[in-house]
Amino acid sequence: MRQPMTLVEGEGSIIILESNSLVDRVLYEITEAPRFFEYILRGRDPWMTVDLISRVCGLCGVSYSYMAAKAFEKCLGVEVDEYIERLREAMHLSERVKSHALHVFFMNLPELTRSRSIIELASRNPVVFRKAVDLVNHSRRIMSILGGRFHNVVNVRIGGVYRAPSREEVERAKIEVTGALKTALELADLVLSLKPITGLPSVGSGVCIYSIHGYPHHGDKLLLGDKVYELCEFYGGVSIPHRVEHSNATHYRLRGGESYYVGPVARFNKYYSMLRDEARELLKSHGWSPPLGVVEGYVARLAEIVNALLEISEILESHREVQKPSSIKQENIRGGSICEYAVEAPRGVLYGRFKLGDDGRIQECTLITPTAQNLASMEDTATQLLRNKRIDGKAVDVAKSIAVAYDPCISCSVHALRVEFLRINP
């Protein structure tokens, strides 16, 4: 039995393993072919890599370019003007707003309101639909002003940006931020009044970038529980990649087999106290506070939308003229240099590691995406909730609901996710 679902980014299948007419295990099969970006980048120079890598993901292009630029800047000793660095953070945050708005209002909200699709939701409540579209469009225009365009932005480079916005452009961006914040707050009453299909807490531990200066955006350390890890330590032995027969995507588990998750809920649960006062007061007024489970991720995403817009507004208020961006000095490029960094993409920790050859070009590249790190936790969460339950329409709905809540970025949402049942012979 197959059930179509169009509320995730990409193509795959939910597989429910059955034993004695009861659920034994839930798997999420990823059937899309590898895109080989880690191989495409080999032989490229760092400058070209920053531009090319944004094409890995249409929704998270800023995160990829920003991560690569920060990785090369850190290991090659490139200094970035303080305002330009903040400007890139604003670009990154505007991407977070756009991605979260698309997920909350066009993927998660139909599921939360028990609508069959965004079309049905729009017909039932056209005002909410129009405001959701307005919020996405505000974020797109902010990205266009700061990044050159709203899709796969072209304004991140090693040492800074290709072009800083003019005073007039900054004023236009401020207007868009004000409009986006007003719209987000108007939608908050609806979103924060909803309850998920299940209250099950997420299975596994939350992992996010370690931060001491504010809500996490990027860094070179990770936080798991109360322990802080260097990136090379975490991805070199704490997080272990696993290949599974039912998926083309690599799964990641902690040493010992426990799954873990990354993303807005992991950030929210660890750094709630570092959200802006306005964001925390909004949540408190609706009775929300940490800890959240992943199925309550829409609450964290809305909080991050408000928080990001407040931060962007503050950054734009500090606008000033800047000098020419810094660049890499050839003597700083040494064969064997390891350049690595992580950013909090909308869906969680995005890690990149680049090894440079003697010619200064990429010799090896490793990219670990948020979705790859979430897949094991996604399966464990669904399995824990549904194991030994009857296989019926409700079980299918729950399995779908969990997939939507984790917001896997597989490819794009025009594909369908089918449900397949396999019987295990006792």
Image: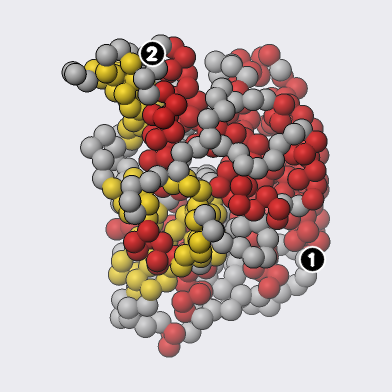
Horizontal side, residue 316 vs residue 363: left or right: right
Residue marked by disc 2: 390
Q: Is 303 in front, or is 48?
A: 303
Q: Nearer the viewer, residue 187 or 412?
A: 187
Q: How many numbered callouts? A: 2
Q: What whole-number distance in Å separates the C-alpha atoms at marks 1 and 2?
A: 58 Å
- Quadrant showing the N terminus: top left
Q: Quadrant of residue 331?
A: bottom left
Are the residues tagged 1 and 2 within 8 Å (C-beta)?
no
Q: Is residue 93 visible?
A: yes
Q: Secondary structure at mark 2?
A: loop
Kind of residue at badge 1: Ser
Q: Measuring from the top left, give residue 65's x and y in whole percent.
A: 50, 59
Question: At which x and y percent is residue 300?
Answer: 64, 41
Among the two numbered marks 1 and 2 on one chain, the one whose residue lies closer to the N terminus = 1
Q: Amino acid at mark 2?
A: Arg
Name the residue rendered at 48%, 47% in the picture.
205
Query: Which residue corresponds to mark 1?
Result: 318
Q: Position of residue 35 (x, y in %)?
A: 32, 47
